[in-house]
Amino acid sequence: MRLYVLIVIAILAMGFFVACGSDETEAPNSFGSTDDDDDDGGGDGSLFSEECDIDYSVDMDCDGPEAECTHARLLNEDRYAHPEESDCAQPLFYDDPVAAVAEAHSRDMCERGFFDHANPDGESPFDRMEAAGLGFVAAGENIYMACGMSLSQVITQAEIDFMDEPECEPNHRSNILARNFKFVGVGIYECDDGCIYLTQDFITYAYGDIRTDQHEYCPALD
């Protein structure tokens, strides 16, 4: 099992800000569809946080493969479970164009035999997002690889391993709990050699979704 993190926090004071487009940037039209085939029940209150007054069981609008949707829902479960560390971050919503970028990277890592955020062509996650026409003001990526595990095991173990990291530090965990990420896409690819690659791509399209209030619990992430 291997895991690797790349994070970009959209806070100018830290110098890790990535901007592309303006505050008029909108999410792609494919987001927010009302497809009756959506496999998320959502909104049943099972993950209602009284501390945050937020229902993290909200429908993510995930119409992707079952494995990807199942894994994506775990991210909101972790946001629910860590309200102080996430600073009552809003639930993540699933974004099909971002998921396509994530899936392509997982497939590429398998087919070209590498494990990194930068592919052999030198393209970063942000290069890949821009090439897909995704204008963003904040973005980040977590990647994971496991061999000899079943798909169902990887779906859960990847999130466990990502979250089994120190609080309030730039890492996989802080990507998952980041209050300034609004959308997520997951790409999982099973190789013929028995290895499975998983990519989580996070994105925020509009400056209006970037919080400017102080993060009380994790001031180092401000």
Image (cartoon, helix red, strand yellow):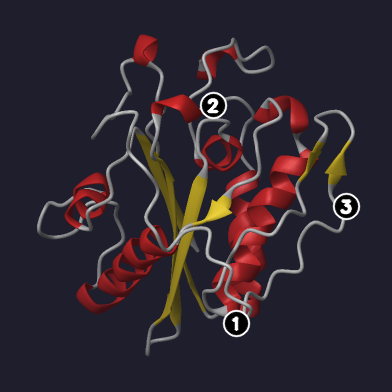
Front label number (2 vs 3) = 3
Residue 34 falls in which quadrant of the image?
bottom right
Q: Residues within 10 Å of mark 2 (few under 14, many from 20)?
A: some
Q: Please give the residue where the numbered disc 1 appears in the rendered image.
A: 150
Distance from disc 2 to disc 3, alpha carbons, whole Å, reads: 30 Å
Q: Secondary structure at mark 1?
A: loop
Q: Please give the residue where the numbered disc 2 appears in the rendered image.
A: 169
Say which amino acid is labelled 1.
Ser
Distance from disc 3 to disc 1, alpha carbons, whole Å, reads: 31 Å
For the question of whether residue 160 can be seen, the reply is: no
Q: How many marks?
A: 3
Which residue is nearer to you in this view: 122 or 65? 65
Q: Is residue 147 above or below residue 91?
A: below
Query: Mark 2 or mark 1, which has the lower sequence index?
Result: 1
Q: Is residue 107 above or below residue 75?
A: below
Q: Residues within 10 Å of mark 3 (few under 14, many from 20)?
A: few
* Residue 39 in the image, given as x and y percentages of width and height: 67, 76
Q: Please give the residue where the numbered disc 3 appears in the rendered image.
A: 45
Say which amino acid is labelled 3.
Gly
**Would residue 49 appear left or right of 199 to someone viewing this image?**
right
Query: Mark 3 or mark 1, which has the lower sequence index?
Result: 3
Which residue is nearer to you in this view: 80 or 212? 212
Q: Residue at x 58, y 60 (%)?
A: 158
Q: Secondary structure at mark 2?
A: loop
Query: Mark 2 or mark 3, which has the lower sequence index?
Result: 3
Is there a contact, CB below 8 Å, between mark 2 and mark 3?
A: no
